[in-house]
Each structure stands twice: as structure tokens, then as C-alpha cells.
Image (tube, helix red, strand yellow):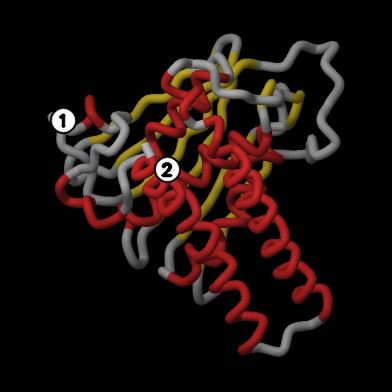
Amino acid sequence: ARDDVLQMVSHDLRNPISTIGMTSELLLEFSLDPQEERKHLEIIRRTVNGMNRFIQDLLDVSQTDAGQLAIETHSISPGALVREACDLMRPLVEAESQRLEYVVPDDLPFVMADPARIQQVLSNLLGNARKFAGTGGSIRIQVVRSGEGVTFAVFDNGPGISPEEIPRLFDRHWRARETAHLGAGLGLAIAKGIVEAHGGRIWVESEVGQGTAFYFVIPVAPSHEEPHPDANREEGTAVGIAQSGE
């Protein structure tokens, strides 16, 4: 059990530690205007807060398998969740000369979500997409209404996953042979537990040579639900792009 916890810590802290490291290097190596500098410091602050939340939540990990993972849901805009995840991933994407874009229609309803937990899911999916896409690759997030829920999709143009490996992707500790060096094999199992704790589901579609798409759906918030303070609905379709060298 202790080995499981150690593997989980190393996996889920790798992305935020890399974000802090690269953002810190940027601040140290370049003279930025105060507004830009504050923006990068805010990324570090939010990343550290996310790491603290993860460390505190390690005691809850065993509840994932039992379907009893503790979550605290609020009514929040899907766009706010996606923008936050992309902001935190941007330094890593730019370091690999990758293209990251997201599209969130303005007419989407709010969802019932634990913002920190869904950030954990998006961080894992974006981290996997970044690794699979490789240097110069493309990553895209798309959000759509689907029945009584909202579906988040993370696409990459990487090498794809073979059919025989897809059924085992969400098993704890299992890793595809081609990517065994990329992590401890816990991220997707954790993401599955979080999504299911929200009453949603998560799945993957992939073809060798055609890239990979991970999807998860979470319920729409009741109309009477008070919005979360960070709901941040914006007017118009939200389209964001982060690309190195531009």
C-alpha cells in the first residue's frame, strides 16, 4: 500500500512541479513587465495550491476503488475549468513547441463539479496528450452538451493506442508498452475514480497512427444551484491557443 501511495505522488506531482520549474526559469531569465510577471507568479501560486490539495487528498485515494471518493461539487462553467487547466499546462506545452487549443461554446450550461478534482482529471489527460503528441504536436480540448451532461474531449495527434491495450488503460498500475517510461500508470485510474464520483463516465477512442481522444461527461447543474465563485462564464465562444514561437 505504501508503494502505491509513493507511485501516485510521483505521478500526480510531476506535471505541477514541471510547471513551477519552467515558470520560475522564465521569471529568472527574462525581464518581464509587471503585469506579465504577476501572471506567471499567479500560475505558480495556483499550481502550488493544487499540489497542496492533492497531498491532503492522498488519504482519500483508497476510497476511489470503493466508489466513495470525497468530492465537493459546485455549479461552475465548463469554460472556467478548461481555461484554468490550459493556463497551468501552457509552460509545458510551449517548452515542447506544441499547439494547445480549446473550444468552448457560449451556450453550454453550468456543470456540477468539484473544481479541484476536475482540474486533476484535466491535468492528467492533458499531461498524457502532451507526452503522446511529442515535440511539435497538437492538443485540442472540445466541450459539448450531451443529453443531461456536458462532455469534455481531449484530442492529440500522437501515434495512437492499439486495440488490445485500450480495455486496460484505466487499470491501476498498467501502462502501454510504448509509454511505460512516461509514468506510473495511475493517472487514468485516478481520473476514472474522480469522474465516476461525479456520476459521470470516462472513455477513450484511438487508432494506431490516427491519434487519441479521451472523453468524460459530468452532469449539468440544476438551474437553482448557486454558481461557484470561480464560475467565470464569458460571453462568446471561448477559443484559446498556446503555441511556442508565436
To which quarter of the image does residue 114 belong? top right
Residue at the image point whose x is 59% and y is 67% from the top: 20
Identify the image quadrant of the N terminus. top left
Q: Residue 156: x percent and y percent?
A: 37, 47
Residue bearing the label numbered 2 = 5
> Pointer 1: what residue?
163
On the rendered structure, is 220 left or right of 156?
A: right
Out of 24 and 34, give the one closest to the viewer. 24
Disc 1 vs disc 2: which is toward the camera?
Answer: 2
Mark 1 or mark 2: which comes first in sequence? 2
Say which residue appears at 34% left-offset and 67% top-offset: 135
Q: Position of residue 228 (x, y in %)?
A: 81, 31
Residue 33 lies in what quarter of the image?
bottom right
Disc 2 element: helix
- Tell me the kind of residue under disc 2: Val
| Vertical comparison of 166 with 239: above or below | above
**Residue type highlighted by circle 1:** Pro
**Disc 1 to disc 2, how far (Cα)?**
30 Å
Q: Residue at x 76, y 24 (%)?
A: 75
Residue 234 placement: quadrant: top right
Where residue 103 sits in the image (x, y, percent)?
A: 58, 41
Is residue 145 shown to the viewer in this render? Answer: no
Looking at the image, residue 209 sits to the left or right of residue 24; the answer is left
Circle 1 sits in a helix, a strand or a loop, which is it?
loop
Residue 211 at x, y = what percent? 28, 44
Do the numbered discs 1 and 2 sit on residues whose CB atoms are within 8 Å?
no
Describe residue 103's horizontal placement relative to residue 74 as left or right: left
